[in-house]
Structures are given as C-alpha cells and as structure tokens.
C-alpha cells in the first residue's frame, strides 16, 4: 500500500467529518470534540486549523484514496502530533506510515503525543515511530463522557 501526504483540500473535509463522527472511532480515540456530529463546529475548527501558520496538517492518501489526516500543532515548546485514520482502514499500517511521513516533513524535536491509555493501536503506532512514554495524565474524554487515563509520549531524536 502506497501511503502519501498532501495538503488538505476543501473536498477532503466531508470525508474527515464522516471519519471523525464515527461513534466507535471516536470512543477509541476518546479525546475528541464535545459533539463530533456538529458539522458547524467541525467546519469552524478546520477553518481555524487551515488559517493557522503554526499548524501543519496533511491529508493521508493510501493508493491515492483519502483515508485520514495527520498533523503537528501547538506552541514551539510543546509541539504535538495528531492523526486520524478512517476506521475502515485500521490494522493495515496506514497510521504508522502516515506518521513516519509526517515526521519526515517536521524536523523539529522534541515532538509530543497523547493517547488514551487503552487505545493500544495508537500507542503502538507512536512507539513504532520512536515515541516513548514519558508520563501519564487523566482527563475528561468527551467521546466517552468520563475521566480517562492518558499516556504522554515524546520523540526526542
């Protein structure tokens, strides 16, 4: 499977919305927007992302088809990575390939990540890409409606 990244296009947003409003995917991710099915909030969020010069977001393509997105955001002393792959494509190595491609575009280090402690797939992706667990946190996970344990991970090299 050929995984590539490109700039986000307007036509990608309806797909991202569908992927991110999938209840099962949101439950696994845990830390989502308050209401992933609120299209107006989604559109406003993505308008802010695309207008910000300190955020790098890319569309993830697998064999030319849009399957998700990945990016880096946050202040210079706490740059965070993020990724979202459509649930229909989980378990195929796409998130790992996308994150590796993103890391090749972003030379700054350290980079940080957060994942629900029980989101074993996401933790595995981050570890395969060189991130190490550097701490724990607990926060309110909107998608679960409850406090959830979270792992903090860092990539130094």
Image (tube, rainbow, N blue to C red):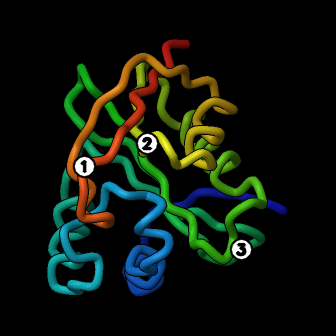
Secondary structure type for disc 1: strand
Q: Residue 52, can we see it?
A: yes
* Residue 119 x %, y %: 53, 49
Q: Earlier in the sequence, mark 1 or mark 2?
A: 2
Front residue of 151/68: it is 151
Query: Which marked residue is nearer to the observer: mark 1 or mark 3?
Result: 1
Task: Bin the neighbour count of mark 3 within 10 Å (Cα to Cα): few under 14, some 14-19, many 20 and up.
Answer: few
Q: Residue 44: percent from the left, percent from the top? A: 15, 74
Quarter of the image for residue 11 reads: bottom left
Mark 3 and mark 2 lie on one chain; the one further toward the N terminus is 3
Whether residue 104 is situated above or below residue 3 in the rendered picture: above
Is residue 119 rendered to the left or right of residue 127?
A: left
Of the 4 image quadrants, the one containing the N terminus is: bottom right
In-front residue for pair 94/59 = 94
Say which mark, if any, is on residue 147.
1
Q: Which residue is mark 2?
A: 115
């Amino acid at each position: 499977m050929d995984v590539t990244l490109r700039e986000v296009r307007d036509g990608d947003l309806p797909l991202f919305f569908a992927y991110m409003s999938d209840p099962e995917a949101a439950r696994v991710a845990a830390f989502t927007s308050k209401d992933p099915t609120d299209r107006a909030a989604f559109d406003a969020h993505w308008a802010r992302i695309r207008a910000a010069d300190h955020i790098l977001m890319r569309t993830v393509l697998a064999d030319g088809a849009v399957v998700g997105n990945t990016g880096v955001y946050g202040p210079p002393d706490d740059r965070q990575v993020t990724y979202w792959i459509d649930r229909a494509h989980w378990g195929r190595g796409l998130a790992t390939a996308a994150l590796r491609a993103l890391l090749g575009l972003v030379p700054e280090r350290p980079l940080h990540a957060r994942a629900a402690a029980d989101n074993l797939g996401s933790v595995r992706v981050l570890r395969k890409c060189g991130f190490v667990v550097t701490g724990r946190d607990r926060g309110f996970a909107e998608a679960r409606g409850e406090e959830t344990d979270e792992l903090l991970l860092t990539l130094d090299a």
